[in-house]
Amino acid sequence: MPALDGMRILDMTQYESGTSCTQALAWLGADVVKVEPPGTGDPGRTLLRDLWEDSEYFANWNANKRSVVIDLRSAEGRDLLVQMVPKYDVFVENFGPGVVAKLNLSYERLREVHPQVIYASIKGFGSSGPYADYKCFDMVAQAAGGALSITGDPDGPPMRPGPTIGDSGSGVQLALAITAAYVHKLRTGEGQSIELSMQEAVTYYMRTMIAIGSKWGSRAAQRRGNGLEPTMNLFPCQPFGANDYVYLMAVTDRMWEALCRVIGQEEFADDERFSTAAKRRENRETLMAAIADWTRQRTKQEAMRELNEAGVPASAIFDTRDIFTDPHLQQREFIKTVEHDEAGAVPMLGWPARLSASEVPIQSAPRLGRHTAEVLADDLGLDQDAITQMAAAGTIELEKSD
């Protein structure tokens, strides 16, 4: 049985921070009903869109959900949503500053109709403090949380990190908080509100770098590029393309000795120039050149295999195509095949947490309004005539026929 079977979530999220939260819960078995505006729905549906009506971006963050379209600009639409709230355990939103108040969908309002509701919000900077009214996206949160300050070369400017930890990192943290609140509700019958600041969420991923170079926040931690240590660094491999590199980390004396052996420089282990980590840093260029001479004779996969077999932690630099074609991930069945309405059978990355008794198959993200009639009939007992009338009035929208 899915681990969160029975948990019902009214999903008022868009783009990524909120949608990543509700998708994580859906992949653990929760029933997630995504409420979208008429027309184009979640703005993420058209973000980075290529050939299809819904973008790959949207598909990556909205699997295993049901789509209902309600016009919340109308009083009738807002009333309809409020009627739905008591049927759900959790209400999740990541609207910009002031939107919830404008729609009259605050925690206090929803608690009037559903005292046990769990009301979860993601805000860029939280709902209090000098920055509360500032709008926020992923990289804004990463900048405010410190991530850009530690990324890049030591002598260069701050650099934008690649992964969207400001968004999806916030979403997964909120999913954990919602799960905890749900357990609390099962024990006590009490609902509660949850607020998560994206700025604060990013700082969770900063703790190691803070510990390495910040001295309890008394100074700015240094940018380290690909590494200041010559034995914890990036090295080129054949055929010398943009991502043909291997990253290795020889962090102990045993790993250092193993590295010397595997690159055919056993004498380095007894060389006074490299006898300590500090001396290896002093002679960084000589040592890195010797390691690079070895890696340049191999592909990144060959270097990864030989280093690991020798006891040196290392990985090829996997690009996004490598991830989908990697035999290890394929053998572990992490790459899933999902039937998409327009694109057909497409590969998607799976959910990394594997629960032995709670497997939830991945389902394609829903088309806009696909489940409007189904959900309103089940939740509110509306018959087809009532649904048809509301659709004609523009209060709701049904899935468009091809």
Image: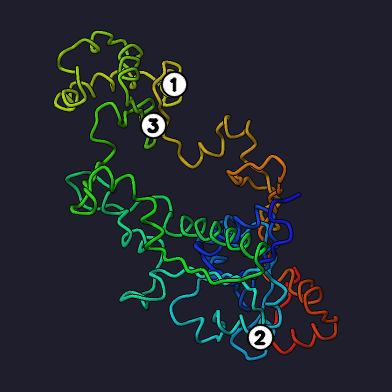
The disc placed on residue 77 is 2
Q: Is residue 205 left or right of residue 375?
A: left
Q: Residue placed farthest to the front in the image?
A: 188
Amino acid at circle 3: Asp
Q: Please name whichever residue, 130 or 47, is drawn nearer the observer in this view of the structure.
A: 130
Residue at the disc numbered 3: 244
Of tags 2 and 3, the one toward the viewer is: 2
Instruction: Locate residue 252 relative to residue 73 in the image: left or right.
Output: left
How dense is the environment of label 2, judged by Cα within 10 Å: few (below 14), some, or many (20 and up)?
A: some
Tell me the amino acid under the disc marked 1: Asn
Q: Does residue 4 lie above or below 255 as drawn? A: below
Percent of width and height locating residue 111: 61, 80
Q: In this view, does 257 lie above or below 197?
A: above
Badge 3, how many Cα within 10 Å: few under 14, some, many 20+?
many
Q: Quadrant of the C terminus?
A: bottom right
Residues at discs 2 and 3 in contact (Cβ within 8 Å): no
Please provide percent x and percent y for residue 81.
Answer: 67, 81
- In x, y percent, where is residue 233? 30, 31
Residue sitting nearer the eye, 263 or 196: 196
Q: Regarding mark 2 in the picture, which secondary structure is present there? A: helix
Q: Residue at x 39, y 27 (%)?
A: 239
Instruction: Please report whichever mark, 3 or 1, sits nearer to the chain's N-terminal start.
Output: 3
Which residue lies at the image location 65% right of the left edge and 74% below the top edge? 116
- Disc 2 or 3, which lies upstream in sequence? 2
How far apart marks 2 and 1 lie (CA) works out to 58 Å
Callout 2 amino acid:
Gly
Q: Name the residue under label 1.
A: 308
Q: Is residue 114 left or right of residue 177?
A: right
> In terms of secondary structure, where does tag 1 sit?
helix
Asked which secondary structure carries label 3, the reply is loop
